[in-house]
Image (cartoon, grey):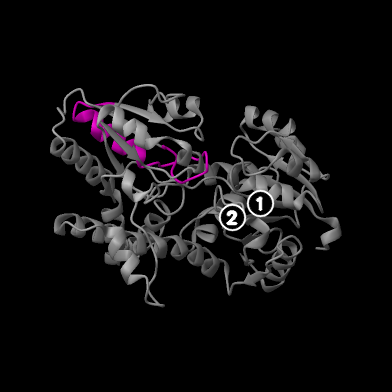
Amino acid sequence: MNLENVHIAVIGQGYVGLPLATAFGKKYITIGFDINFSRIDELKNGIDHTNEASTQQIKSASKLVFSSSINDIKECNIYIVTVPTPIDEFKTPNLEPLKEATVMLGEILKKGDTVIYESTVYPGCTQEVCVPILEKTSSLTFNVDFYCGYSPERIVPGDKINTLTTIKKVTSGSTPEVADFVDTLYKSIITAGTFKAASIKVAEASKAIENAQRDVNISFVNELALIFDRVGIDTQDVLDAAGTKWNFLKYKPGLVGGHCISVDPYYLAYKAENLGYHPEVILSGRRVNDNMSAFVANKMIKMLIGAGKQIKGARVLILGLTYKENCPDIRNSKVADVHQELEEFGLHVDVHDYQACPKEVKTVFGITLIDQIKEKYDGILLAVSHNKFSEIDITSLKKDAKSIVYDLKGFLPRGQVDARL
């Protein structure tokens, strides 16, 4: 297929799909598709509540339009799937959004079309799960009538430096010719260049291990935090000292949430267990990181007790609810788990986060965000290091109520905090 003839539909207009659609929409006829009508209406007006694309960036994509109608994408010949791939309550892959998107595409798939998946999956998922659905619903034959590619998303929500076009893109295709085409297509918009993987399965695996590696590294420093808390020394002080060696990896302890690091390792583990291997390191890292919310809540309780505070009815302020700093994304936020743990101890807990959408937070977590800090608190928990939090007068808040301050991010000046994670 010639690049001059491509007509692209990007399925899903979230944190991954929108930046991709705006990038392609500057060069090719592109439709940003999403089943969420309100999301499409928002984007048609140049508004993106995820803050991944500015109004100017959206409008600069002159060949991009947005739609929720499947009829509008029927004439496309390149379909790029960027729907979420979460886990369920049993921590196993929930492929329903991916399957539903694939069924939809199968119903409009034509001879010569190419479907490229960007959603994070386990190695083999594209050809074992998606391709059979496409064949069944389209009555077409894979690698004869239609083709597939896989190019794992590497978007980091909230990161304005490492953006879509500045991160090298891994590509792959279901035949050597399709692999070349997919690579050329992405190379035309990715200034950092591309890396053509040996196969779709290799590309899928590369994405899975990127986040699993980071998860394991964070779990190591989280375990160090658990140990050093018992020793009675500051973990950050230890890491600062160890970090003076050139080859020491400078990871920091913290709550691990979000749509990638806290989810993707379970996809890799799922595939491994289906093949008869129980992954010890990956799952042990997940256990450590999943248990950090309980550790943080218990540490706060111990600090309150140590300060002579009565626990039942004590007031605590949590600063930050999103899963990472300077980003409105609340998916899999572990701060919500800390909130729940503290409330179960009988505390009154307020949460302040100017980045998060109050309506979304209320719907997802049942938590009502406060707009302003007006009350006096027995304890303050700095959970997310949003830039604007540096403007809060922590010293005055602490002095007025003789409150204790627990800084999970090493964000506040050392003299203002009673403990750091």
The amino acid beneath tag 2 is Glu
Q: CA distance from mark 2 to mark 1?
A: 7 Å
The amino acid beneath tag 1 is Ile
Q: Which residue is mark 1?
A: 80
Instruction: From the viewer's perspective, tell me whether residue 371 is left or right of residue 343.
Output: right
The dominant secondary structure in magenta is: loop
**Residue at screen point 48% across, 26% down:** 358
The mark found on residue 15 in the picture is none
Q: Which residue is mark 2?
A: 118
**Residue at screen point 33% across, 56% down:** 253
| Magenta range | 320-348
Residue 323 on the magenta segment: yes
Residue 83's quadrant in the figure?
A: top right
Instruction: From the viewer's perspective, tell me whether residue 318 is left or right of residue 331.
Output: left
Observer-nearest residue: 203 or 137?
203
Q: For the view shown, which residue lies furthest in the right direction?
A: 4
Residue 190's quadrant in the figure?
A: bottom right
Q: Quadrant of the N terminus?
A: bottom right
Observer-nearest residue: 285 or 91?
285
> Which percent across, then down, holds residue 61?
79, 46
